[in-house]
Amino acid sequence: MAKEGSTEAPIRHPLDFNHPDFLDPKKLDDEMRRAFDICHGCRRCFNLCDSFPKLFDLIDESENEDVDSLKSEQFKPVVDACTLCDMCFMTKCPYVPPHEFNLDFPHLMLRYRTAQKKNNELPKIPYQLAKIDRNGKIGVLFSKLINWMSDIKNNLFRKIFSNEETLVFALLLTIGFLIIFFFRQHFNSFFNEFNFCIFTHRDAEASRRIWLE
Ligand code: SF4
Ligand code: SF4
């Protein structure tokens, strides 16, 4: 019979990315259901993050109020809400190794995300935000500008930043600029398709080159 819960220090086993079962859809689905079922019976992590409340709500609203009633597509929001903070593993869970349940919830989320990456199904915005090296380089490029804008002596931008409406406007403008920057290839085909000329005194090909290359 399984022990009620381990009182020993958690042992973290490395993720076996190269195991043949690691990305096997059926094996992964089975493991998600096994873990979710244990969590459903425990619910100790209900207030740690968004993942667990989402999971418990899904189960409570399912037909038979159990994990078997869930469709596999419903797992995604639970995984998306996990920030991989590791709190459940490190501080709460009595079923982590060496307990025989061998539960490692954050590693399971990571395994699911690895499968999503393989299938090109990762959510787009977090995927872009996670490119830390690239984003860091972009941040460094703009650091002087941002420091100048936020300088205590810069009255104009201090005013913009202190007013909610102008701040939202400035943020929307920046987001618009970033969208154009990151999705310039799509805009590229848009301009090609409609032969759109940005400057009236230049032809469409010249505009495309100026803005998109
Ligand atoms: S690792 Fe994920 S599931 Fe665990 S507490 Fe952190 S956010 Fe929640
Ligand atoms: S991760 Fe562990 S402690 Fe948290 S709800 Fe699941 S079984 Fe309970």
Image (cartoon, rainbow, N blue to C red):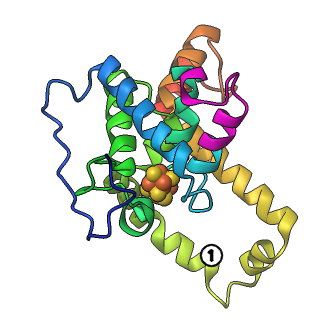
Q: Position of residue 43 (x, y in %)?
A: 57, 53
| Pointer 1 residue | 149
Verify whether residue 63 appears in magenta.
yes
- Give the amino acid at mark 1: Met
Residue 116 position in % (x across, y down): 39, 28
Question: Can you see residue 203?
Answer: no
Residue 8 lies, with reference to residue 3, above or below; the image says: below
Outermost residue on the bottom side: it is: 153
Q: Is residue 7 magenta?
A: no
Mark 1 neighbour class, 10 Å CA radius: few under 14, some 14 to 19, many 20 or more: some
Q: Residue furthest top?
A: 193
User: Residue 171's quadrant in the figure?
Assistant: bottom right
* Magenta residues, start to end: 55-69
Q: Residue at x 47, y 28 (%)?
A: 209
Query: In front: 195, or 158?
Result: 158
Q: Quadrant of residue 110?
A: top left
Q: Residue furthest front?
A: 1
Tell whether 209 sits left or right of 61. Answer: left
When the figure is inspected, residue 46 is found, relative to residue 199, above or below; the finding is below
Residue 156 in view (yes/no): yes
Q: Is residue 43 above or below residue 18?
A: below
Q: Main secondary structure of the magenta part?
A: helix
Identity of the residue drawn at 79% across and 59% down: 168
Quadrant of the rendering where the C terminus is positioned: top left
Assign a secondary structure to mark 1.
helix
Q: Is 186 positioned to the left or the right of 29 in the image?
A: right
* x and y, in percent, of residue 188 in the image: 52, 22
- x, y percentage for residue 120? 39, 23
Q: Residue at x 55, y 72 (%)?
A: 146
